[in-house]
């Protein structure tokens, strides 16, 4: 009976040893696997950190490129009328303004109309003030004259100032000796005049 107990105790001890050995080897394997798993994870993390600034830089460049492509020039327009009370002048410049507002809504910064009260000196002063106010902007002006309004001689000083200021200015007929910054529009075609204003402002 005593021998049976000894044998049983011995088998129990052997079984316990075998169990402990098995647990130890599986724990070692698991530990090794864990260490191996951590290494690639760290490498992936480092790769992500290295590529992140490049990705951000590329995204910023793309955004800047898109915004520059979408950028639109803003144009400021001055309509200077010999006498706003004259029905033909009023209808014409109102039609030009409406056409600019409808067709070029995204490009127009402001359309300014001014009656110069049949005074050539006042016309020049208004132009000077407008070029100072809009300095650094793209701009163009037109003079809405009348058949018996300003003479070519009256207009020449204003046209010469426009050349000095580097701005384009339109008149309704060819004026001999006018500077290159002068363009001619058709007083019977408000839409065509609006188009010429935009073309000349963006030169």
Image (cartoon, rainbow, N blue to C red):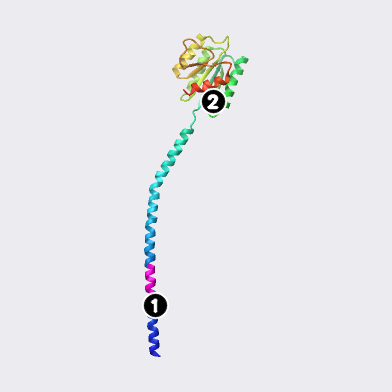
Task: Please determine whether, in this image, residue 64 is positioned above or below residue 47.
Answer: above
Q: Nearer the viewer, mark 1 or mark 2?
A: 1
* Mark 2 closeness class: few <14, some 14–19, many ≥20 residues within 10 Å: some
Is residue 24 rendered magenta in the image? yes
Find residue 43 and report its horizontal and vertical position in percent: 37, 54
Q: Residue furthest bottom?
A: 1
Residue 194 spot, x, y in % from top left:
55, 21
119 or 3, which lies in front? Answer: 3
How far apart marks 1 and 2 lie (CA) works out to 94 Å
Q: Quadrant of residue 42?
A: bottom left
Q: In terms of secondary structure, what is the magenta stretch mainly?
A: helix
Residue linked to disc 1: 16
Name the quadrant containing residue 37.
bottom left
Say which residue appears at 38% left-offset and 50% top-offset: 47
The label shown at residue 130 is: none
Q: Which residues are magenta?
A: 20-27
- The kind of secondary structure element at disc 2 is strand
Q: Determine if the magenta segment contains residue 6.
A: no
Whole-percent x, y for residue 131 in the image: 48, 21
Helix or strand or loop: what does disc 1 sit on?
helix
Residue that badge 2 annotates: 110
Q: Quadrant of residue 118?
A: top right
Kindly check if marks 1 and 2 are in contact, taking CB atoms under 8 A apart as contact. Answer: no
Q: Nearer the viewer, residue 51 or 132?
A: 51
Q: Earlier in the sequence, mark 1 or mark 2?
A: 1
Q: Against 175, is 141 above or below?
A: below
Q: Nearer the viewer, residue 73 or 11?
A: 11
Residue 195 horizontal/vertical position (percent): 53, 22
Query: For mark 1, does the 10 Å Cα neighbourhood hold few (<14), some (14 to 19), or many (20 or more) residues?
Result: few
Task: Assign the N terminus to one quadrant of the image.
Answer: bottom left
Residue 85 visible in the current orientation: no
Left or right, residue 201 beside residue 40: right
């Amino acid at each position: 009976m005593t021998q049976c107990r000894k044998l049983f105790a011995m088998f129990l001890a052997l079984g316990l040893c075998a169990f402990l050995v098995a647990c130890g080897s599986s724990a070692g394997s698991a530990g090794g696997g864990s260490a191996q798993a951590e290494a690639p994870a760290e490498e992936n993390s480092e790769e992500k950190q290295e590529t992140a600034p490049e990705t951000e830089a590329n995204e910023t460049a793309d955004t800047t490129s898109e915004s520059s492509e979408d950028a639109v020039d803003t144009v400021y327009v001055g309509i200077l009328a010999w006498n706003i009370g004259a029905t033909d002048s009023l209808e014409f410049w109102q039609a030009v303004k409406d056409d600019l507002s409808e067709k070029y809504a995204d490009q127009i910064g402001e359309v300014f109309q001014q009656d110069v009260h049949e005074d050539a000196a006042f016309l020049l002063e208004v132009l000077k003030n407008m070029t100072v106010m809009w300095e650094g902007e793209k701009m163009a002006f037109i003079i809405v004259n009348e058949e018996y309004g300003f003479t070519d001689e009256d207009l020449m000083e204003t046209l010469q100032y426009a050349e000095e200021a580097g701005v384009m200015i339109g008149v309704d007929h060819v004026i001999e000796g006018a500077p290159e910054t002068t363009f001619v529009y058709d007083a019977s075609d408000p839409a065509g005049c609006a188009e010429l204003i935009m073309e000349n402002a963006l030169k």
